[in-house]
Amino acid sequence: MPADVLALTGAQLGVWYAQRLDPADPSFNVGQYVELCGPLDLDLFGEAVRIGVGETQALNVRIVDGPDGPWQVIGEAPGWDLDVVRCDPEEALRAMRADLATPVDVLTGPLLAEVLYEVGPQRYLWYQRFHHILMDGYSFTLLAGRVARIYTALVGGRPYGDSPFGRLGAIVGQEIDYRASGRREQDRDWWRDHFGDRPEAAEITSGAGEHGFLRERTEFPGQALLAVAKEVGGTWADAVTAVTAAYTWRMTGAPDVVLGMPFAGRFGAASTRVPGMAVNVLPVRVTPERGETFADLVRRAAAEIVAVRAHQHYRGEDLQRDLDLVGSGRKLYGPSVNVKAFDYALSFAGIDGVTRNLAAGPVDDLEFSFYKSPADVLAVELDGNPGKCSPESLRAHLRRFLAFAEALAVAPRTPIAELPLITSPERDLVLDGWNATGTPVTGATVVEAFRAQAR
């Protein structure tokens, strides 16, 4: 095989087959924007973006479909440029969402878009959209960080240095080696043992799914949750995973809680410098036991995540086949929890960049994405499939989730089953609103009331 032609990674193949099964599905468009407020030099910014994208082999490929399956050819991506559009912020966001909602043909593209929206005096939104077959969420941060450093060097008149990115062939080659190794067999045996009973993954929502997703986002103080995690030797990621598992358990009453969680799926330090599509979404089994407290669940969630991470290179798609779930109507996992522990701090020659994710891939049930600020403020983005929930029900889930998280953090030694799940307005509605059946009556007898109504 020529050096400029590579096989697809397992993650890419998963996207390839899903997109080919439903070409009209735009869910594999992933995108974000970075807000920049300051005296941005548009010419130098455009040059920085072009250099950064040019250094990223994953963004300079063409996907081809041959008799033996799909391949990627490096250096043959369709031409592109950074578009600069002047409009107001609402128009910019509408344009971004419209672009993300437009299906893309994997074979013809365009598989990427780079637009700088000038939305006010010294206020800009740098929009990036890629097809998921090219990049995962981790790769977004690699590219954005590199562009920021290049721009800063250009403004200062300094060299921006050689590209820190490794070659795409590195992660492709490592995965090929893994699939032929005994380590893969060991991972498969572990997964078959861990999920040998084929647990029924509980879903919070139900119904026929549709393209697209709904989103609600809010921030809340995280100090109490972090204190619980620290006390039991866990991390903030363990804490929010445990909250999500507890919420799923209480909402469904299911005997098993299996969450979907993305893992980097990369081999060693060298592959962490390669932008590309390698993420692996795997099931994390965190079922609260009778009488278990939140502190107990955080400890178990931490142990489960460590165990799964040790076997993260075994593809979730392969596990589905191993468990005979393909075509069965059963899911490998229910809700998803995505802990965004990347470094989102960006500086463009002193101009801070604030990153906002717009779309991260298909949403089936509910997807909980968490971020943490240096001040321990937690943010949660709750995505839901529009065929399975309404905007109001999604907002209700978010309110209920936050109230339940607070209850867990305040009483980490109280059994999870004993803590209140519904919010105060929901409680008032159940106890008072739905029971407010009283109606004014007169002193007349039943016969007199009957005659009055008959008249």
Image (cartoon, grey):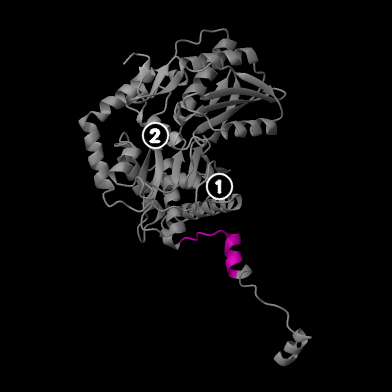
Residue 67 or 34: which is nearer the viewer? Answer: 67
Quarter of the picture holding the C terminus:
bottom right
Quarter of the picture holding the N terminus:
top left
Mark sitting on residue 232: none
Residue 286 visible somewhere in the drawing: yes
Comes first in the chain, label 2 or label 1? 2
Q: CA distance from mark 2 to mark 1?
A: 23 Å
Above or below 84: residue 290? below
Task: Please give left or right for residue 73 compared with residue 212 in the image.
Answer: left
- Residue highlighted by disc 2: 14
Q: Amino acid at mark 1?
A: Pro
Q: Main secondary structure of the magenta part?
A: helix
Secondary structure state at the residue bearing disc 2: helix
Secondary structure state at the residue bearing disc 1: loop
- Residue 115 percent across, percent down from the top left: 61, 23
Task: Please give left or right for residue 191 compared with residue 388 in the image.
Answer: left
- Check disc 1: other Cα within 10 Å, few if <14, some if 14-19, many if 20+: many
Above or below 426: residue 285? above
- Check disc 2: other Cα within 10 Å, few if <14, some if 14-19, many if 20+: some
Q: Name the residue at 49% across, 44% down.
A: 368
Q: Amino acid at mark 2?
A: Gly
Specify start and end residues of the magenta stretch as a single range. Answer: 419-431
The quadrant in which residue 88 appears is top right
Q: Name the residue at 27% across, 52% down.
A: 197
Residue 454 or 153: which is nearer the viewer? Answer: 454
Number of numbered tags placed on the structure image: 2
Q: Name the residue at 58% across, 67% down.
A: 430
- Residue 264 percent across, percent down from the top left: 38, 32
- Residue highlighted by disc 1: 386
- Residue 274 percent across, percent down from the top left: 40, 22
> Is 69 inside the magenta-drawn segment?
no
- Report the residue that reaches farthest toward the right: 455
